[in-house]
Image (cartoon, grey):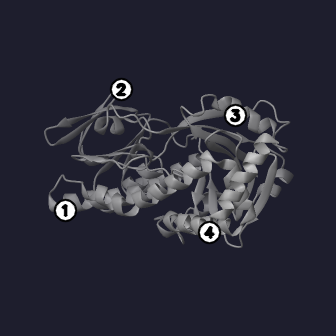
Amino acid sequence: MPTYDVIVVGSGPAGATTAYRLAKAGLSVLILEKDMLPRYKPCGGGLSLKIDRVLDTDIKDFIEATVFGAYFSYGQKEGAHLMSEQPVAYMVMRDKLDAHLTYEAVRAGATLLTGKKVVGITTAKNGYEVLTKDDVFTCRYVVGADGVNGAARRFIYPDTVRTIAASIEAEIAVDQSVLDKHSNYVHIDFGVIPYGYAWVFPKKNMLSVGIAGFRGVVKRPKEFFDTFIKGHDTLSGINGITYKGYPLPIFRNQQILTKGGVILTGDAGNLVDPFFGEGIYYAIRSAQLASSVICDSIRNGSTNLSRYDKLLSNEFYPEFRAAQKVSQFVYAFPRVWYDILTERTELAEKYFNVLRGNNSYDNFIKELKAIGGSLVKTAIKKSIVRLFS
C-alpha cells in the first residue's frame, strides 16, 4: 500500500477543499470518508455571502436559495421582516455541496475511498498510520476534517471537554405556494428555546427547520423542536416529521490545532461562529489556510505546521471572540435583543454586512453600543414590566 503525502479524514467542505488544493499542488492525497457519497448531512445549510470571496470552484448550481433578509420573531408571537436590497446568504443542501466539492478534488488528482471510517491515528517512522476497521494507511501529514468527535480531534485532544450546541434539524416538504412565500428570507426565532434560536431556511423543494441551544442549558431539545413546529403557522399541521440531532462545536477558547504533522480544520477545530452557528465558510477557509501551510512545509522539508495556528489567530479568533460577546448578550437577553432589533432596524443591515464580509463583529459591537445605550435600558425596563404585568 502506498505512502501518501497527505491523508484527509472526512469529505465535508473542509476535507474536500483541503484535498482539492493539495492535489492541485501536485501532492499525493487520499480522502477517507466513512459514508458513501452523496450522503445526507443534517445541517441548516446557511452559507454567508462572504464565501464568494474565497471559493475555488463555482457552486451556483448547488445553491438552493439566495436570501435577502430575515423574519425575526420572539417566542413565535411577535415578528418583523427585516430585508435588504442586496443578498445576505446562500442556502445549500450538504449532500449535494459536499459531493460536488469532493469530486472536484478527485478530478484534481486526489484518491477517494468511501466506507472507510477512521478509528485511530498513530505515529509511525516517517509520518503517521491512519487506521480504519480493515486497513492501515500511511502518510506524512494528516488533515482532520472528520468533525466534532473525529479521530483526528482525539489524537490531539483526547481528554478535552468542548462547548457543544445541541441541534435538531429536519427537511420538511411543503406546497410550492409555501416555498414561494419563503424563498428569499430566513425565519429566526429568539425566545422559543433557552440560550439558542430556532430557524426556518428555504430550499428548492423543502424547508429546513431546526433549533440549536447549548447542551447543559437546553436539556430537552426535542421538546423545544416540537414546540416550535406546533407554534408555527405553516408547519403546525404537518405530521410525521423526521428529524435528526447533531452536535455543533461552538468556539469558546483559542486552541492549538496542530500537533506534529496533524492539523485540524472546520468543525474538528471548533471553527464555528459562536453567534450564528455557521460552520461551512470557516470550514472552507480553514482548509485553504491548512493546505497552504502543508505545501510550504513540504517545500521547506519541515514538519512544523504551527504557522497555521498563527494564521487562525490573525484571521479567525478576533472575530470569534467578538461574536462570542454578541452571543452572550443576545441569548441571555433575547427579549431585549428583539426589542432593540425591531426598534432600530438599521442594526439588521449592519449585521447583514458581517455576513457579506463588509463588516466585522468587532465593528458591529461598536455600532450596537453607539445605537444601544439608553435603548438597552428602555428594552430591559419593558421586559420587566411584561414580566410582572
Q: Is residue 277 visible?
A: no
Q: Secondary structure at mark 4?
A: helix
* Residue located 20% across and 58% down the image: 298
Q: Where is mark 3, residue-wise?
A: 224
The amino acid pointed to by label 4 is Lys
Q: Secondary structure at mark 1?
A: helix
Q: Nearer the viewer, mark 1 or mark 4?
A: 4
Q: Secondary structure at mark 3?
A: helix
Locate the C terminus and report the quarter of the image it occupies.
top right
Q: Where is mark 2, residue-wise?
A: 133
Q: Nearer the viewer, mark 1 or mark 2?
A: 1
Instruction: Report which quarter residue 159 is drawn in.
Output: top left
Distance from the alpha carbon under mark 4 to that under mark 3:
30 Å
* Residue located 67% across and 33% down the image: 243
Q: Where is mark 1, residue-wise?
A: 299
Give the mark nearer the N terminus: 1 vs 4: 1
The amino acid pointed to by label 3 is Phe
